[in-house]
Amino acid sequence: MKGDRIKKYGIGVLLVLIVALAVVFHFEIYFENALTGLPETDFGVGISNWRILFEPFLGPLLFLNRSIYALRELPMVFLWVLIVYLVFSGIFGREGFRKKKIGNVLLNVLLMLGICFSIFVLILFVPLPNNTIVNNSKNAVLVTTHAHTEYSHDGLISQEGMWRWHQKNGFDAFFITDHANHKKSLEFAQAQRKGAFPMSPLVLVGQEHSGSNHMSLLGLDGAFETKRMSDEAVVDSVHAHRGVVIINHWFDGKGKEKEFYRHLGADGFEIENVGSDLYYDRDLFSNLKKFCSENDMLMVGGLDFHGYGRACSVYNAFEIPNWDIMDPVAKEHAILTILKDGPQEKIKILIYKDRPYYSDSNLIFRPFFTVIDYFRTLHMLQVISWVFWVILFCFIGKWMKSTYIDFDLWVILLAGASALFLLVLAMVYYVKGEKVKGYSDMYTEYMGILGPVGLVLLIISLFAGYFRFFKPTAKSI
């Protein structure tokens, strides 16, 4: 009875904390202009109904996906999950050693590692119904200048999937900038013009060229090649075909000095790129911003989307009046004209802000602050979803207690489900990889990871289940 009262009080405290963080310490999600550092009030946040309905399951995953240093923070979350389990399992105390076999605990840790890996894959590789942008402005048109499909060696999404992704995220147009290939993008754009699928968002043709630095070559018409060409020849050729050249993620330090690209005649620089960490050195940011302003070079935000990774966090808002009544040719011309001639005031670079900025120091403790920051962003319907699911799980917990489904069984079931998820995803990647053989290397690469990990996890799960619950003479291991 005492234990039941403690659980009830604990659940009550949890619900009160959720409400307090969401209401009293609320953090309003907004879109910030990267060049001014100020909120852009013409743009709001749209929350999917599916996310609201399943908020306790989808919300934390999406919040982790949007972490400033996602690839480094996610493993820290899983590390703390394992630490909490080890502490509560009693492995660090004498009483724990007497009551449990150390092998049983370690086997659970192994299964939990597999579960954590599958969640990591789910967060980064499976598109979830995330928050999107709501464009309330009069003349703003949302455009991506940097994205890769499966016809790029590092892409993991079909052309149709890329189009649907941009549609769901509120874009009006996007350039496909596959590496060393724009013919497939041209075919896709031409199919759209012929009515194969809707005109919004508008597909535009580009290519990412890997010279001394990666460059987005935008507005290509098919009569164009970059093979074995120097940077200067590439820039000249793009301009001869009335295209635009943007220097991508220059701030990663792999290219030449920014003055070199100005002399080449490049039209602008990516001032932000969210392909990896959300932010880079702010002094370098200020230096690049000043350089572009002084040399009349345009600045854009680089989404650098490959079909996996962080949910959409950067939007370019072009000021183009009468967009809705333009034909596709006029729309493309308007975008390219702004990219080439500016002025910068006609492009706003919007960054999705759902938490206070923090540096990458002491990321090991960041999961605790991330939990707090997550609950601070919730609105009333999301809070109600949490309350509903917490109460529902209380009833499920009572049923579990009466039917005696213990923790060890749940770990095995979740590990088995995780293994099947990894194996199915590996098979999907195999099928997709065969269709685009010679283009994307990512399907084969990730299939070679997910398949073996899923198979090993499935074998371990079956082994644990058999010896724990089915072998007549076996004791729990």
Image: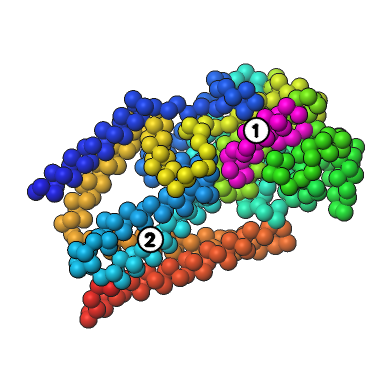
Q: Gap in Å between the C-alphas at discs 1 and 2? A: 41 Å
Q: Would you call the spot at circle 1 few (<14 residues within 10 Å), some (14-19), or many (20 or more)? A: few
* Relative to 151, 296 lies left or right: right
Q: Which residue is mark 1?
A: 283
Looking at the rendered structure, the secondary structure element under dot 1 is helix
Q: Amino acid at mark 2?
A: Met
On the image, the x and y values in percent for residue 126 come to 52, 50
What colouring method underlies this structural image?
rainbow
Residue 164 visible, this orientation: no
Marked residue nearer the N-terminal end (1 or 2): 2
State whether residue 126 is above or below residue 389.
below
On the image, the x and y values in percent for residue 413 come to 34, 62
* Relative to 305, 88 lies left or right: left
Q: Would you call the spot at circle 2 few (<14 residues within 10 Å), some (14-19), or many (20 or more)? A: many
Numbered circle sitting on residue 229: none
Numbered circle sitting on residue 112: 2
Q: Pointer 1 and pointer 2: residues touching (CB < 8 Å)? A: no
* Relative to 247, 82 lies left or right: left
| Quadrant in which the C terminus is drawn | bottom left
**Residue at the (41%, 72%) spot, across then down:** 459
Count the labels in the image: 2
The answer to which image quadrant residue 98 occupies is bottom left
On the image, the x and y values in percent for residue 369 come to 40, 39
Q: Amino acid at mark 1?
A: Asp
Residue 51 visible, this orientation: yes
Considering depth in this image, is 93 or 317 the residue closer to the camera?
93
In magenta, the rendered stretch is 268-292
* Relative to 445, 329 lies left or right: right
**Residue at the (70%, 40%) spot, across then down:** 251
